[in-house]
Image (cartoon, rainbow, N blue to C red):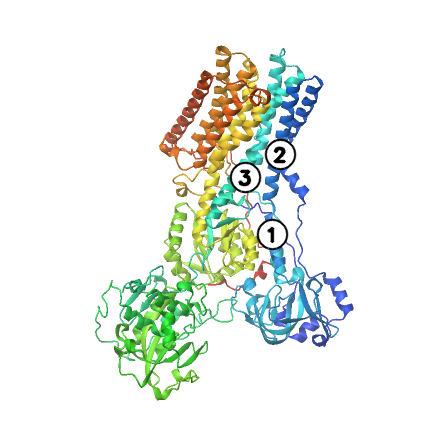
Amino acid sequence: MGKGKKEEEEVEAVPQPSWHAMTVEATLKEMQLKEDLPSSGLSKEEADQRLEQFGPNKMTEGKKKTLLERIWDQVANLLVLLLVIIAVVAAFAAVAASARDDPQGVLTNCIQVGLIAMVITVNTIIGVVQEGSAEKAAEALKGMLSADALVLREGKEVQIPSVEVVPGDIIILGTGDKVPADCRFTSVSNIACGEAALTGESVPIDKTTDAIEVEGNPEQTPLGDRHNMAFSATLVAQGSGRAIVVATGDNTQIGTINALVSTVEEKKTNVLEQIDHISKILAALILTASTCTFLVAFFLNRKDYDAFDAVLVALVCAVGMIPEGLEAIVTMTYAWAVSNMASHNAIIRALPAVETLGSVTVICSDKTGTLTQNKMSVVAFVTSNAHYRVDVNATDRVNTNFVRDDSYLAERADHQANKSAGAVVADGPNSAVPRRGRAEASNHMAIENLENPAPSAHGDAGGEDADYPFANGDSPSFEFIKGGLIAGVLCSHCVLGTDGGREGEIGNPTEISILRAAYMAGIDVEGIKEKNSIVAEVPFSSAYKFMSTVHEPIPEIDGPGLEDSWVVYVKGAPDRMLALCNTQMKGGVIGEVEEVRKTKWTEQIATLSSHGLRVLALCKAIIPKSEVSAGDQLGPEFINERPQKEWLSMVGLCAIQDPPRPECIDAITEAHGAGVRVAMITGDHKDTAIAIGSTLGLVDEKYPSGITGPELDAMNEEELMEAVQKYNIFARSSPENKLQIVKALQAQKEISSMTGDGVNDAPSLKQADMGVAMGLEGTDVAREASDMILADDNFATIVYAVREGRVVWDNLRKVLLVNTPINNAQGMSVLFGLLFGLGQPLNAIQILYSNLICAVTLGFVTAIEPAEEGIMELPPRRVGKRLIGRYLLLRILLGTATLITMVCLSVLWVEKVVSDDLQVKQSIAFNTLDLCAISICLSARFAYNSSLHPRLLTGNKGCWYSVALVIILQIMITYIPKLNDLIFSMAPMTGAMWGISIVGMVITFIVMEVEKAVRRYLKAKGSDTDDRELDGFDRGDTRTSHMHLPANAHKLGTAELRS
């Protein structure tokens, strides 16, 4: 199932020393290089010798199929072989007809040969065009590599092709250069490399030359922390430097990923395997029916057929039963679904992947940008006595986006209820501890020291006016919001994006969130910043975790009488700010000052942190103008080393989060209703992940908590398999964890979908049954390694695609219900016509026409049928389930028998009532068959619901166009001179003959509808009439169960995913 993956071949790469843990001198010694290499470089002889030893600096390419091999794959099956044999015999028949001066026979057999050749050619072209996308992931990786490199050879700087770079070369790097190989820096000058695609770190990494001291295994050092190394395919963001090449080609970090994704695997899903299986069964049936037809023609109709003629009529039976259009209609079904999904932002890269979607049992999704909006937003503003909920999905710029709701985030999350304030912060997004693979905490205003102050410090007694300044449930005034957020607006150099969005924004997303909240409340952010420019400032530093600006007072906010004063705004880590406060703004109202209640603020900070929210404190103070002059460059001591240490007024706390996409909540509910589990994998902190997961519906009684990447790393295989079934939230996860999770799920027979965006996500995308890459934020490598690309990076799009995958499976069953009876009836009508002495009811040209035009046209109606009601209320399809189950087989046999009966009865009627002429009989047989096929099609549109309903007239415009086309073509073929008698060997139809054909059409429709009524009754009694359970028709789940990671998977690094 899924990708039809082969067992991974454990290919061991050349062991590499831990270069980052070695000094430059030790590196030179290990590589057996001279000590003056950094200043002289390799000689030409040394470079040539090393090129011979290590090979060119390029990644190994997987074996590609030639065009002839691709063509052979399409034609190497039994049905095509039978068609070729029939075409050869028809060619001989044309020659024989020419010898006996039979122009009709020559024309008929030549047309037959031409139509068969066209069928084979069209099907082959369709198959070849759709094949080959799996190879492109490796090509995308190669496209990331540098074309040229500047190296030091024999003391001179030389530009050479990057494929000629060898271990031991001295590489000279400058701003904008692509690094051509993995290398160890020997000298640096303010150099930093952008390694986001490889490590997930969005900020360029500053580089040094010092060896990295490591406790334990040096290889466990995340790539992002190897700051004395530069890696192949990364980019120099600034500065310059020189480095020794230590690994090239497949031995580089990017080469490791290439080895994991470059193997070209055969992607053959359940449906394609079953089409092959069905073809083999049909081939056996066709040979049996053709043999019987030959025997009946030769022995029971000896006066009309000699041996050669008996062979020809047997081949007509074979032509009728071979589903020439089946592969084309299957491809059309896939292509239609792909087109539909593309219009909804789901881009399918390989047609068979569509079918896999219908079997998905677990969707593993990234958090940021997929489940969330990728837009940091203020979700709550907390004052001394109130909580204001902020509508992050609002589109109107009004003050009513803020609503006082004192129950919102008023209590700690359950799992943090009994911890100290400091312990709560340490577990969440405000922690100052860097995540794995990161040099610093992702929150640059992280909390380092939040502990409850002594009870005696600042009394917390005193009453509060519960409705001050606004009652619970009311929206605050515009003036209140402006006064509350003005510190976050003016104390900032960030630039808000267009219309409050991300496009064009500049600055830290956490700080921008305050600007966005103010903007959506109706505040003219840019206007107020221009009007109230900065007089002096303390620039932000992660050392003291705050920023402060000095401004002229704003009378409508600060009040009158402050002409000789400056207003100081401070924004920063809440623990730092709270320690500097001696007062607070009562209820958040500017000018209403009261003594600060630190214990309450501390608990508010801990409470917000427990819900996975980032917290920023906004403070304010008034100072005399004599203390600061315009343009002063102030240091942190201006804020935290004043004579009166506690001198600020706390205005409020901004609780910040990347909020969930609102449509994802409904999408996850729909997925759960469809029996599809949703798991969230993120590099973010556990509290944040659980908070988002709770909002989305991923955390419940069955999956009450989450687990972290380090915890997964410490588990054995059994514990890991248990963990992936126990938790929906995977926090602080790395790309290697993603691969572990996929393998653990697959080991338990789950069909997994995995999302990813970085280069190091490519192996997990390849491993997953359904790899999903991001279209907006993703890398080319991730996109090429995936089966589906989200053009909008939206989780809801995945659920839509799962729904369409189920529709494809249902529609393929409907296609088989239409095409198979038509094909069977064409061939078997010939056999039964001869058996009952009715002659040959259908000729080869009529049969080929029905196969190519009628069957494909009517089959396409069911191929594009929209989803039936309730499709997302059913569980995922079982792995190993065959398209044709017991009940579908019975329906196909019933349809076949009905068509044969109607054709034979119509021929019998016309022979007895109208004429015994063969062309007359073939005319009514041909039209009866195709009109009855329309009835099969109309009934098959709905698997259970009755077609005797107005729904038959709506929902599928293609239905009535197809029916009209078939009827018009039947009339044209029947009455156009030369076309009817010379090519199709038919006579014009009388009104009575049309009446008999229409009666047969009605009977066929009624028979198929009665069968559906019986199935509805049986389903109500508990029978598996959906063919959903595994039975003797099915092969079961044959996938192997193991959790062995591919060789070198550990080299993906332990750097956690972006938050």
Which element type, helix, strand or loop, lies under badge 3? helix
Q: Residue at x 62, y 54 (%)?
A: 139
Asked which quadrant contains residue 698, the reply is bottom left
Give amino acid for label 3.
Thr
Q: Residue at x 71, y 76 (%)?
A: 39
Q: Between tags 2 and 1, which lies in front? A: 2
Please tell me how crowded label 3 is: few (under 14), some (14-19), or many (20+) other residues with Cα within 10 Å: some
Q: Is residue 66 or residue 979 the one in the foreground?
A: 979
> How far apart, in angstroms, are the residues tagged by discs 3 and 2?
14 Å
Residue that carries the numbered disc 1 in the rendered image:
136
Q: Is residue 606 left or right of residue 53?
A: left
Residue that carries the numbered disc 3 in the rendered image:
331
Asked which quadrant contains residue 589, the reply is bottom left
Residue that carries the numbered disc 2 in the rendered image:
120
Which element type, helix, strand or loop, lies under badge 1? helix
Mark 3 vs 2, N-terminal side: 2
In the image, residue 58 above or below residue 225: above
Residue 996 picture location, percent across and down: 45, 18
In the image, residue 131 above or below residue 1049: above
